[in-house]
């Protein structure tokens, strides 16, 4: 247990490193230098040229933006004092938020003001990978003084304008390249996992493999939408519609992940109230995602809060699930805990950000993808482990079945075939066969002399001698008390006299002398009728051997029947 907890903590620490943006290479996805901004509510009739030239102290630089509520706003940047020239053009990058329209006003040192306005699609044409809106700053010979945005229809759930950064074209291209490598790597991984598990499902037919593929496919679709690639593939889509699609796909992904977990664990883990809770939460998560998609334009504050609560409830289900799995000694506990460590952490971070308990961050906003990448990979390992356990169970079952069949076909005392198994393998042979019926002489006296335990040991020694005296492919069976049968093809016959000679030389328990009589016959065994005829003749030959004084062989012909 302690080792599993340590592994889980290491996973969580790794996720914190990934999501916190500490590594230098991770920061490359966030291009440029940050821009401080201040906001002012639009009361109507305000002149953007006057605001950008003389902002005065009307703008609020201290309050948290989300506290100002929804509406239209003016957002002004700090002093920039940089050139945007054709050789080193500047861009301004901002986070993608829910808004109806966005206008950027740019003030240059020569007094000129250049404006850029979005259309009905909002900032969708400006979206770069990572769902960052990038607005180019036209090149002029004068320096850029400051920027002023007019944000219309801001819901202001997280803020009016977040993550403003000033970057060069090279920095922006590098950020896009870094993010494209991240998303392309995940897309390749997801597609490979889907193909791999579908191929396995075709052979093994376990339901949890299909649920895993559904989860990864929905996660791949969510990544395609939330990364901004959807806006590239579908230029006509409005950015608000893309945001609604994000929530729809994220809700479906959460539900699929819970369904996968439910099918992956043993049935006893989800028994009782936990199973009912998982069903309700799973339906609520996808239901709220659909509700968000349909009603966000009319009641976005309400549905956003409902979506946050649904994901908190989904995350909360993990803890009693892991507790019960540990208490019931589930085989998959620590793999599942390791896989879900990152999603739990990111869900908590996003919930805290949605509740404004921590500040917005680009990497927290994109944390779900990073966490689910970890979850998809580790869950794939868990699937492989589950399949290995199922394979081991199958192999054990096959081995037990083989053992049971062997026990059913074997004489328990001597280890030779019993009569039923002997006949099952003998009847139906195509070639001519040689049948030897062997009976130990005066075996009743052996039992009387040595006792039944001694007699049993004589039978075991004799059976061991028969097994080692015949060529491969020969059937050797105990068909009665002290009666044995040997069946071999004519092409590789067993010499009956050699069997008797070896028996005479064998050392028996208590040095007792044991002999045997043998009757033989050759013929076909394609049917039960032929077996009965062949056995009757060989048995008659055995009777002749005993009548002639025992410890001898008598051969009979098939035509004697």
Image (cartoon, rainbow, N blue to C red):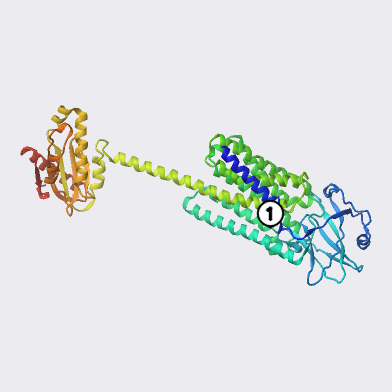
**Res. 211 in view:** no
Q: Is residue 337 above or below residue 23?
A: above
Instruction: Name the residue furthest left.
Output: 548
Q: Position of residue 491 (x, y in %)?
A: 17, 55
Q: Position of residue 440 (x, y in %)?
A: 14, 37
Q: Is residue 367 left or right of residue 515?
A: right
Q: Nearer the viewer, residue 523 or 19?
A: 19
Instruction: Name the residue furthest front.
Output: 24
**Res. 549 in view:** yes
Q: Position of residue 190 (x, y in %)?
A: 59, 56
Q: Is residue 213 left or right of residue 357?
A: left
Q: Nearer the viewer, residue 241 or 52?
A: 52
Dot 1 crowding, Cα within 10 Å, few <14, some 14–19, many 20+: few
Question: At 64% across and 56% down in the image, what residue appears?
Answer: 221
The image shows a total of numbered marks equal to: 1
Q: Is residue 79 left or right of residue 517?
A: right
Question: At 74% across and 60% down in the image, what residue appears?
Answer: 31
Quick one: quadrant of the N terminus?
Answer: top right
Q: Quadrant of residue 550?
A: top left
Q: Nearer the viewer, residue 88 or 120?
A: 88
Q: Quadrant of residue 12?
A: top right
Q: Secondary structure at mark 1?
A: loop
Q: Which residue is mark 1?
A: 23
Q: Position of residue 532 (x, y in %)?
A: 18, 44
Q: Is residue 137 left or right of residue 467?
A: right
């Amino acid at each position: 247990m302690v080792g599993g907890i340590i592994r889980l903590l290491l996973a969580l620490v790794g996720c914190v490193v990934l999501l916190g943006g500490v590594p230098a290479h991770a920061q490359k996805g966030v291009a440029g230098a940050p821009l401080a901004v201040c906001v002012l509510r639009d009361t109507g009739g305000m002149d953007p040229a006057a605001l950008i030239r003389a902002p005065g102290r009307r703008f609020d630089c201290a309050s948290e933006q989300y506290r100002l509520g929804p509406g239209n706003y003016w957002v002004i940047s700090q002093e920039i004092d940089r050139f945007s020239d054709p050789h080193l053009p500047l861009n301004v990058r901002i986070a993608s938020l829910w808004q109806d329209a966005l206008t950027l006003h740019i003030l240059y040192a020569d007094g000129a003001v250049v404006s850029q306005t979005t259309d009905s699609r909002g900032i969708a044409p400006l979206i770069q990978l990572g769902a960052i809106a990038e607005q180019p700053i036209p090149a002029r010979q004068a320096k850029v003084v400051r920027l002023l945005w007019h944000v219309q229809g801001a819901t202001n759930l997280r803020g009016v304008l977040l993550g403003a950064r000033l970057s060069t074209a090279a920095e922006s291209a590098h950020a896009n390249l870094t993010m494209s490598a991240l998303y392309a790597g995940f897309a390749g991984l997801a597609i490979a996992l889907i193909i791999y598990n579908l191929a396995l499902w075709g052979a093994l037919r376990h339901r949890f493999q299909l649920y895993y593929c559904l989860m990864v496919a929905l996660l791949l679709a969510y990544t395609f939408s939330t990364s901004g690639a959807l806006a590239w593939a579908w230029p006509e889509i409005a950015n608000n519609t893309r945001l609604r699609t994000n929530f729809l796909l994220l809700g479906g992904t959460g539900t699929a992940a819970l369904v996968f977990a439910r099918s992956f664990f043993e049935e006893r883990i989800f028994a009782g109230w936990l199973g009912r809770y998982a069903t309700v939460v799973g339906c609520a998560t996808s239901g709220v995602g659909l509700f968000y998609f349909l009603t966000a334009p009319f009641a976005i504050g309400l549905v956003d809060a409902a979506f946050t609560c649904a994901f908190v409830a989904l995350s909360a289900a993990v803890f009693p699930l892991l507790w019960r799995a540990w208490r019931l000694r589930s085989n998959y506990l620590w793999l599942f805990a390791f896989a879900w460590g990152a999603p739990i952490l990111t869900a908590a971070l996003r919930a805290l950000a949605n509740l404004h308990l921590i500040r917005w961050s680009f990497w927290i906003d994109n944390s779900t993808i990073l966490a689910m990448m970890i979850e998809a990979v580790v869950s794939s390992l868990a699937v492989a482990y589950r399949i290995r356990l199922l394979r081991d169970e199958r192999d054990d079952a096959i081995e037990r079945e083989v053992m049971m069949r062997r026990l059913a076909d074997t004489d328990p005392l001597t280890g030779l075939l019993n009569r039923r198994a002997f006949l099952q393998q003998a009847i139906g042979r195509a070639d001519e066969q040689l049948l030897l019926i062997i009976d130990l002489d005066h075996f009743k006296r052996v039992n009387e002399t040595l006792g039944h335990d001694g007699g049993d040991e004589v039978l075991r020694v004799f059976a061991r001698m028969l097994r080692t005296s015949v060529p491969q492919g020969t059937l050797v069976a105990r068909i009665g008390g002290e009666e044995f049968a040997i069946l071999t093809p004519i092409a590789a016959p067993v010499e009956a006299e050699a069997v008797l000679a070896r028996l005479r030389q064998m050392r028996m328990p208590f040095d007792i002398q044991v002999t045997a009589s043998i009757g033989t016959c050759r013929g076909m065994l394609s049917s039960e009728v032929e077996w009965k005829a062949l056995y009757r003749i060989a048995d008659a030959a055995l009777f002749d051997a005993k009548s002639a004084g025992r410890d001898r062989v008598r051969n009979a012909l098939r035509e004697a029947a």
